[in-house]
Image (cartoon, rainbow, N blue to C red):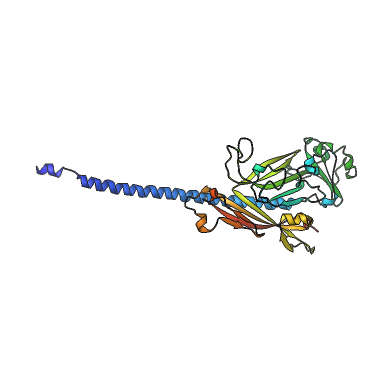
């Protein structure tokens, strides 16, 4: 009997206590694992947010500075040959393609209904966000020696490609690339030779704005079945004779632009104004800088976030306008980035 008593094992009560303690310990371990995983996801999202912001800022700075570059001539001596598509001459996409002789850079104030520029599809425009347009003479890509393209090379380009030929300090001509040897408008730019002060460029144009989705739905527009409803900074690029849409940065929810006007002629902004006022006063040629405000969201949802409690449901920009975070997007952390870009080609002496 004594030997049997020594081998009886754990009692029911002891087993129940051990089971409860094991469950509690397991629950703590699981919660710790979930918490660490969520913290890692949020940290990874924050890093992605910072990287997206860095890319967006650097990209906007670069292309704003390129606007109105025509190869060492002023925009008022740039001419357009016949046969160049309407996207370049200014007879389509009203509001964007003003003649080159007007400017190579222009901004557009955000609207709450419709679109600020007619070539943006209404479904692909994030309301109440600004847009801007740049065009310029672009160096020929894929040339390791950085030498300009010759007449012979330009003539072999796709016929549906736009080029610009510049004589430094004199004038420039926009033309169809395959007509470089026969375009009479190029006669005084010696199309048969390539002296040092003559340079051939590719004509470039970009329209920037915010789109309500990064990946569009089945018909190529936001709001259709299949889109991801993640706002993004996009641009339309002049590609030959077409104007194609390209996604640049996901998570950009708002872009606000404020333009520095130089009235004194000292190449320093005397005051900042919005696009509507600059257009109304015909002062785009006096814009020397742009104050850019971007709101960029973390792409990782944070279920613990309550923007209403934190008082962060809206962002107010320097021009007094306010952007409100949509109710369905208030569990995503976001940050406002502010920077100023000198529009350098309009400040050159």
Quadrant where the image shows the N terminus: top left
In this rendering, position of residue 37 left or right of residue 343: left
- Placement of 276 over or under 2, stated as above or below: below
Q: Position of residue 235 (x, y in %)?
A: 68, 45
Observer-nearest residue: 126 or 244? 126
Question: Is residue 185 rendered to the left or right of residue 315?
Answer: right
The one nearer the camera, 146 or 283, is 283
313 or 256, which lies in front? 313
Q: Is residue 312 left or right of residue 221?
A: left
Q: Residue at x 87, y 51 (%)?
A: 170
Residue at x-position 71% and y-position 60%: 272
Q: Residue furthest left?
A: 1
| Image quarter hosting the C terminus | bottom right
Residue 324 in the image: state x and y as whole percent: 59, 53
Q: Is residue 196 visible?
A: no
Q: Position of residue 16 (x, y in %)?
A: 24, 46
Q: Position of residue 51 (x, y in %)?
A: 58, 50
Q: Quadrant of residue 347?
A: bottom right
Residue 224 position by quadrant: top right
Give the left or right position of residue 318, taking residue 136 as reference.
Answer: left
Is 259 above or below relative to 34? below
């Amino acid at each position: 009997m004594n030997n049997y008593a020594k081998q009886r094992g754990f009692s029911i009560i002891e087993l129940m206590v051990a089971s409860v303690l094991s469950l509690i310990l397991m629950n703590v371990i699981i919660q710790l694992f979930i918490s660490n995983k969520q913290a890692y996801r949020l940290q990874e999202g924050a890093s992605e947010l910072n990287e997206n912001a860095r890319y967006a800022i650097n990209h906007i700075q670069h292309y704003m500075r390129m606007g109105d570059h025509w190869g060492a001539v002023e925009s008022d001596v740039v001419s357009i040959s016949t046969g160049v598509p309407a996207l370049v001459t200014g007879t389509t996409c009203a509001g964007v393609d003003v003649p080159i002789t007007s400017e190579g850079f222009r901004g557009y104030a955000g609207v709450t209904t419709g679109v600020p520029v007619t070539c943006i599809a209404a479904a692909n425009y994030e309301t109440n966000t600004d847009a801007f347009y740049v065009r310029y003479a672009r160096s020929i890509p894929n040339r390791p020696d950085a030498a300009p393209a010759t007449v012979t090379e330009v003539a072999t380009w796709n016929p549906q490609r736009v080029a610009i030929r510049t004589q430094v300090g004199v004038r420039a001509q926009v033309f169809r690339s395959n007509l470089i040897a026969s375009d009479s408008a190029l006669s005084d730019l010696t199309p048969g030779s390539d002296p040092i002060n003559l340079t051939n460029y590719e004509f470039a144009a970009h329209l920037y704005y915010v789109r309500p989705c990064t990946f569009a739905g089945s018909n190529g527009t936001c709001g259709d079945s299949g889109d991801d409803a993640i706002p993004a900074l996009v641009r339309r690029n002049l590609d030959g004779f077409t104007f194609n849409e390209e996604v640049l940065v996901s998570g950009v929810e708002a872009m606000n632009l404020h333009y520095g006007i130089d009235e004194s002629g000292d190449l320093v902004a005397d005051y900042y104004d919005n696009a509507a006022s600059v257009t109304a006063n015909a002062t785009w040629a006096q814009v020397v800088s742009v104050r850019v405000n971007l709101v960029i969201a973390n792409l990782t949802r944070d279920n613990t976030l309550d923007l209403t409690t934190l008082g962060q449901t809206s962002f107010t920009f320097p021009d007094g306008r306010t952007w409100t975070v949509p109710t369905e997007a208030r569990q995503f952390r976001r940050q406002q980035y502010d920077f100023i870009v000198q529009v350098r080609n309009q400040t050159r002496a």
